[in-house]
Image: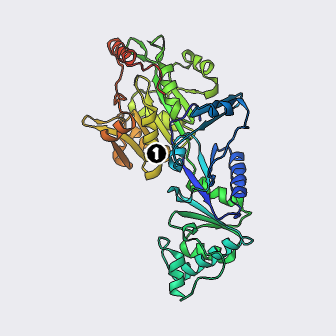
Amino acid sequence: MLAESVVPSPAVAVVGRHNSGKTTIVEGAVAELTSRGLDVGTVKHHGHVGFDIDVPGKDSWRHRHAGATETWISAPGQVAMIATIAGEAECAQIVRHMPGHDVVIVEGYRKSGLPTIEVMRAANPHDAQVAETFFRAACDGLPLTCDFVQATRASHREAPKPGAPVDPGKMPTEATVAVMTDIPIAHEAAARYGIPSFDLSDTQGLCDFIVRTIARPRLTAVIQAGGESRRMGCSKATVPFMGRPLIQRLVERVSHAADELVVTTNEPENLGFLREAYPQMHIRLVRDELDRRGALPGIYTALKNATYDAVAVVACDMVFASPRLVAAEFQELWHTGAAAVVPANRNGYEPFHAVYRASACLPAVEARLREGDQRAQAFFDDVEVRAFPQSRVLMAEPGGRCFINANTPEDLAYTEKLARDEGDELIL
């Protein structure tokens, strides 16, 4: 991520019985995914009460044992937090506090509600029992929602076998999205249920699956800075706002939702200072693709120059542009497969605080441009546009000021007063 992210991380849980080899699977997957350039977070479920990541007697340990309920340990390149809580943290709550990763891999937490990857190892007797029960259930056509253990015993008129019984709470379920195993009947059972299965050693195959079905796609954010504005009397990008060029405010806001940041401008020579101010962001300054100006040509330039298929387009005069709204629109685009997610209210669409799928929208935009159309919404009837209603905008950004434009010096003064009055110099 370019900055402290507001984009939720997708997560998957690797589950199995004790000694199934979950840690080995997670370790291999993290190494492989990281080598592919993905940002991976992990969560480990520790089933026993009490653990400590600090050595007794060290300063942080002394802080906590003196009564601190939360202690942060910070060192160059590392930070850790230890907190005292009532009960046990929900996995979903933990993942919510880990935004901006391409994927979070959770070890354990079978009942988290996350999609799960089930691990079964032939050398583990408990896994062998589960595989047999799983296979019988598949052969009997039992749904993944049922209690396999009781159902297979009843259908086969069996008494419980001697020894440790199969725990019905540790079986594959409707949350199971993949199986990793070296047990042939487990592979066959998975195939009967239409669940992908991989050999225990097939880390690459598993990671291909995670990248294809679970990992977060990347997002390009494009700030449309244009050039001289007749109504403003000068370039909106460089007009002073709270003591700095307005474009810096937009960069700092939008970067919290983006993997790549592009600024479209007809004055790249005047915006080169952005690269010096934010070297870690690798901002690209791009000239308009077409000689003619207009809303639709601006969207064309944004889609044409984005590295990633998902493209957020934000106008540089939207003083209160919201990274949280961009993130919410991106989630909607990703999960629905729509071509565009565009905020809509009683005044119509807001196409310059929206997210587009370049592969779907670019051909439609090009076709409309060939017809001479300049309107931002000209291509909306040609692709699947998902309206993002005001109620959901307010859920993402309760202030609801995201679409205020500063078109004139008077607008600029008004929005600057709003920002100062509400202490809106920092957004996070």
Q: Mark 1 points at which residue?
A: 331
Amino acid type, residue under disc 1 in the picture = Gln
Task: Say if 351 sits above or below 234 in the image.
Answer: below
Residue 310, image x and y in percent?
50, 42
Q: Is residue 231 visible?
A: no
Tell me the element at label 1.
helix
Q: Where is residue 111 in the image (x, y as percent from the top left)?
A: 52, 59
Colour scheme shown: rainbow
Q: Tell me which corner region of the image, top left, top right, bottom left or bottom right, holds residue 292.
A: top left
Q: In the drawing, does residue 53 fall left or right of residue 394?
A: right
Residue most extreme to the front: 66
> Which residue is at the front of the view, 2 or 286?
2
Q: Which of 81 and 295 is in front in this view?
A: 81
- At 51% from the left and 20% from the top, the residue drawn is 248
Q: How crowded is mark 1: few (under 14 residues within 10 Å), some or many (20 or more)?
A: some
Name the one closer to the observer, 181 or 264.
181
Count the marks: how many?
1
Would residue 363 appear left or right of 34 to someone viewing this image? left
